[in-house]
Structure formats: C-alpha cells, structure tokens
Amino acid sequence: MGSLPIDPMVRSVIVDPVDPKRVYAAGAAGLFLSDDAGLTWRPASGEWSSDPVGLSLDPTSPNRLFVILSDGSLWGSENAGSNWKPLGAGAEGNE
C-alpha cells in the first residue's frame, strides 16, 4: 500500500455507502482506492488515454462504478474498479 501521488489534483472523491472505509479518488494521476478510510491508497484504474474528471457509484450496488474522462468518454466497472469497459462514445476498449 502507498499514498496518493504528490499533488495529484483530485477532482472527485466518493465514499462507499456500504463500507465507509472504502474511498475512491479520481484526478490527473488516475483513479485510486483506499480500503482504510484514506490512510493508504492503491491505483484502481485502467490505462486510459485521458484523465478521470468525474466519478460515481451505484448506491444500490457499490461495486458498480462509473468514471468520465476529460475526453468525454464514459467507462463502467462492475467489480469495484478492477476492470473497466467503455460505455460512451469516444472510448477505446479496456477490459
């Protein structure tokens, strides 16, 4: 486990409503996940061609995440960010 990169320019933070120790942070350095309320972080993103600018999760199924990138593409994950698939125009495959 590690920490967020120095000066990561975090644009979006989400706390899992079922497990408040699980926190996601998205920004210029990518998408990061913490399982200990932000004490330590690990990368949780794929190799996207642009930066994550927005993050959301399904409150009825917190393992379902959505991220929008600076190029306007929308990506979804059904497994808490382990794998991603494009959901909107402009995204290339990343599963």
Image (tube, rainbow, N blue to C red):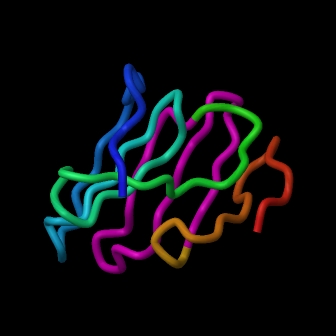
Measured from the top left, where is residue 68 in percent x and y? 57, 42
Q: Is residue 21 left or right of residue 82?
A: left
Q: Residue at x 71, y 30 (%)?
A: 71
Measured from the top left, where is residue 67 in percent x and y? 53, 49
Measured from the top left, where is residue 55 in percent x and y? 43, 47
Q: Which residue is drawn at 50% across and 32% down?
A: 53
- Secondary structure of the magenta portion, mostly? strand
Q: Is residue 61 left or right of residue 19?
A: right
Front position in the image: 21 or 40: 40
Q: Does the magenta stretch include residue 65?
A: yes
Front position in the image: 44 or 14: 44
Measured from the top left, where is residue 95 in percent x and y? 76, 69
Q: What stretch is highlighted in magenta?
A: 52-77
Q: In this view, does 76 lie above or below 14?
A: below
Q: Is residue 86 left or right of residue 16?
A: right
Quadrant in the picture for residue 37: bottom left
Q: Which residue is drawn at 14% across and 66% down?
A: 20
